């Protein structure tokens, strides 16, 4: 079992502020000056760690290299996480044969701790009938493509996966394109992702029901999503062809070939937006609106298909699952990937590490320790205590985390080391 370590230093007033590092969550806890004790709490791992992400650059694409180097510095990742390939950056698609050689090289050079890839290019975005991100993740295989027009494809084992170790559990590494037309756009995207982290943004999920019923097939689920998200993420169903003049866009889901009015919107850092259509994943020279337009408008992540998918729900993100996983502290790459049942023909783009809901606040009183977080999945937990970080741990108390619960009360913690252990999930 992997654990996040939360270290609390007792100083002065009765609440403490959060310091969020890349490798662990370090929290300064302020209590009465008479209570000088250090408290350490470990949570079960619930998301991809930053240093588990490898950045893959194309050495024949100067923009790719520049984006990769900037992302490495911005996220404070070690140099060993920067991986190099070399291929023609002018083509929109690689042949399966050429791709296999590149992927074999990538796998050979990938450090063993890496759980996901960030690919820093816009083209090529396709490998034969597969998207680049799915081909990197699964390897090229026609089972991920339609056998005939409008056929379904292989289902992803990562779909609605509840863990945070896909390589260990599923033998795969999800991938995402940090795609941009120029460095300014890429830098803005990366900076927004950083600004989003642990921000608990106040914003709205807009579920837009257009008159395009063929592309609006997700709309049937909007009322259920609206009910599920009450008290978790503000959501609103919009029965019109587009959204305009809103400055609090946190999610935007729609179905149409083009989305007008993007210039009138304000996207919150970390926002996710996509439009269900055939060619949204064609990132250059698309006859329909490219998913890249969402990033240029201010979103941090989007999705589109690179070949004709027809309007199969399983080939596009489930808004309910995106919002559920993202709202529970997952990174953008995890939440988006977990929401698509048949991702073989779809490309994921954006800032993979954006995590606006990965947030923790702990308050120590004379009688209890209060934990405020969205990161505990529903289930039964056991609070364990030990004299050292390596144990031996013994049970102290039990905790039941309910669906969408964010505030928890634990026994007051002292100098020992503590961890919450999931006993039974719901």
Image: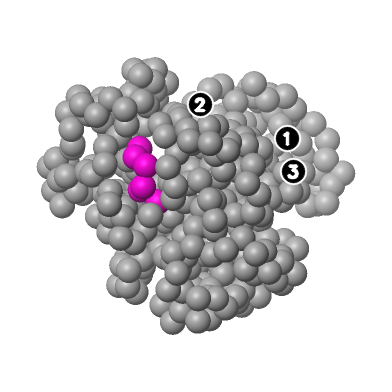
Q: Secondary structure at mark 2?
A: loop
C-alpha separation, residue under disc 3 versus residue under disc 1:
19 Å
Numbered mark located on residue 405 in the image: 2
Q: Could you say which is closer to the camera, residue 227 or residue 392?
A: 227
What residue sits 28% from the left and 48% below the top? Answer: 288
Mark 3 or mark 1, earlier in chain = 3
SS majority, magenta:
loop
User: Would residue 69 appear left or right of 230 to someone viewing this image?
Assistant: right
Whole-percent x, y for residue 125 in the image: 47, 60
Q: Residue at label 1?
A: 421
C-alpha separation, residue under disc 3 versus residue under disc 2:
27 Å
Mark 2 or mark 1, earlier in chain = 2
Residue 388, magenta (yes or no): no
For discs 3 and 2, the disc positioned in front in the rendered view = 3
Q: Which residues are magenta?
A: 276-281
Given contact means CB atoms under 8 Å apart, are the residues at marks 3 and 1 in contact?
no
- Quadrant position of the N terminus in the picture: top right
Q: Secondary structure at mark 1?
A: strand
C-alpha separation, residue under disc 2 versus residue under disc 1:
17 Å
Mark 3 or mark 2, earlier in chain = 3
For discs 3 and 1, the disc positioned in front in the rendered view = 3
Q: Secondary structure at mark 3?
A: helix
Q: Could you say which is closer to the camera, residue 224 or residue 107?
A: 107
Q: Residue furthest front?
A: 148
Q: How dense is the environment of label 1, judged by Cα within 10 Å: few (below 14), some, or many (20 and up)?
A: some
């Amino acid at each position: 079992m992997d654990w996040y370590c939360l270290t609390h230093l007792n100083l002065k007033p009765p609440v403490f502020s959060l310091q969020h590092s890349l490798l662990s969550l370090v929290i300064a806890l302020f209590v009465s000056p008479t209570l000088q004790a250090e408290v350490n709490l470990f949570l079960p791992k619930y998301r991809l760690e930053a240093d588990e992400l490898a950045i893959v650059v194309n050495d024949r694409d100067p923009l790719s290299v520049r984006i990769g180097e900037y992302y490495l510095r911005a996220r404070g990742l070690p140099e060993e996480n920067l991986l190099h390939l070399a291929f023609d950056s002018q083509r929109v698609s690689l042949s399966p044969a050429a791709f296999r050689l590149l992927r074999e090289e990538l796998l050979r050079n990938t450090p063993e701790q890496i759980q996901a890839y960030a690919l820093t290019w816009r083209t090529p975005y396709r490998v034969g009938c597969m998207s680049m991100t799915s081909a990197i993740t699964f390897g090229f295989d026609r089972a991920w493509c339609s056998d005939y027009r409008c056929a379904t494809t292989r289902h992803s084992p990562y779909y609605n996966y509840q863990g945070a170790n896909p390589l260990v559990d599923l033998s795969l590494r999800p991938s995402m394109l940090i795609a941009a037309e120029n460095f300014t756009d890429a830098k803005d995207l990366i900076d927004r992702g950083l600004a989003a982290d642990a921000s608990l943004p106040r914003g709205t999920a807009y579920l837009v029901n257009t008159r395009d019923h063929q592309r609006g097939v997700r709309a049937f689920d909007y009322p259920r999503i609206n009910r599920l998200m009450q008290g978790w993420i503000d959501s609103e169903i919009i029965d019109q062809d587009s959204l305009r003049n809103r400055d609090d866009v946190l999610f935007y889901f729609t179905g149409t070939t083009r989305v007008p009015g993007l210039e009138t919107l304000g996207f919150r850092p970390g926002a996710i937006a996509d439009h269900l259509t055939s060619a949204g994943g064609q990132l250059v020279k698309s006859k329909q609106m490219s998913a890249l337009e969402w990033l240029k408008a201010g979103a941090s992540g989007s999705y589109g298909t690179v070949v004709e998918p027809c309007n199969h729900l399983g080939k596009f993100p489930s808004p309910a699952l995106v919002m559920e996983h993202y709202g529970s502290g997952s990174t953008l790459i995890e939440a988006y990937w977990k929401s698509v049942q048949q991702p073989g023909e779809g490309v994921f783009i954006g800032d993979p590490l954006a995590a606006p809901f990965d947030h923790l606040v702990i308050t120590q009183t004379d009688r209890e320790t209060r934990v405020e977080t969205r990161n505990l999945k529903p289930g039964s937990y056991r609070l364990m205590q030990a004299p050292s970080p390596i144990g031996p741990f013994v049970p102290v108390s039990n905790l039941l985390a309910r669906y969408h619960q964010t505030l928890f009360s634990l026994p007051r913690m002292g100098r020992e080391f503590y961890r919450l252990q999931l006993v039974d999930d719901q």
